[in-house]
Image (cartoon, grey):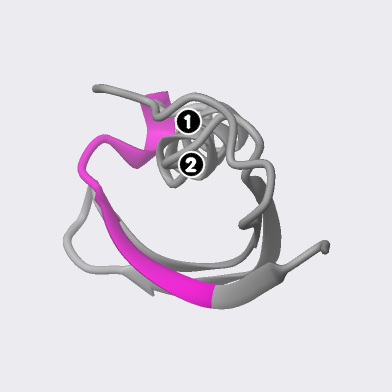
Amino acid sequence: MNINTSYQVAVELNVINWDATNIGVTITEVRDSQKIYTNDIVEIQQVVDFGRVTERSHKILIIFNLTRDLDNLGEKIIL
């Protein structure tokens, strides 16, 4: 029996030093941190840039789709 569950997670991110931040690497790190089990699949659905909050910072919203196979979770990731 292959039981999958899917859900969405939204993460609001305030990037303080926008000019010195590699946003692609940062989004990848946030994506990877959403996994609870090694076999979880996390996909980026959308990135919304709300723009500058201060002179040097930006606010972005990242929406992830997560899929988990309940029959084959894998190891639990301990942070």
Residue at image point 41% right, 37% down: 33
Instruction: Please state which amino acid type lies under the numbered disc 1.
Output: Glu
Q: Nearer the viewer, residue 70 or 15?
A: 70
Disc 2 crowd, CA 10 A, few/some/many (<14, 14-19, 20+): some
Which residue lies under the disc numbered 2? 35
Q: In the image, 69: left or right of 47? A: right
Disc 2 vs disc 1: which is toward the camera? Answer: 2
Disc 1 crowd, CA 10 A, few/some/many (<14, 14-19, 20+): few
Residue at image point 49% right, 24% down: 75
Q: Quadrant of the N terminus?
A: bottom right
Q: CA distance from mark 2 to mark 1?
A: 11 Å
Task: Residue 70: name its quadrant.
Answer: bottom right
Residue at disc 2, secondary structure: loop
**Is residue 38 shown in magenta?**
no
Residue at image point 42% right, 41% down: 36
The part of the chain drawn in magenta is: 8-20
**Which x, y percent locates residue 63?**
54, 71
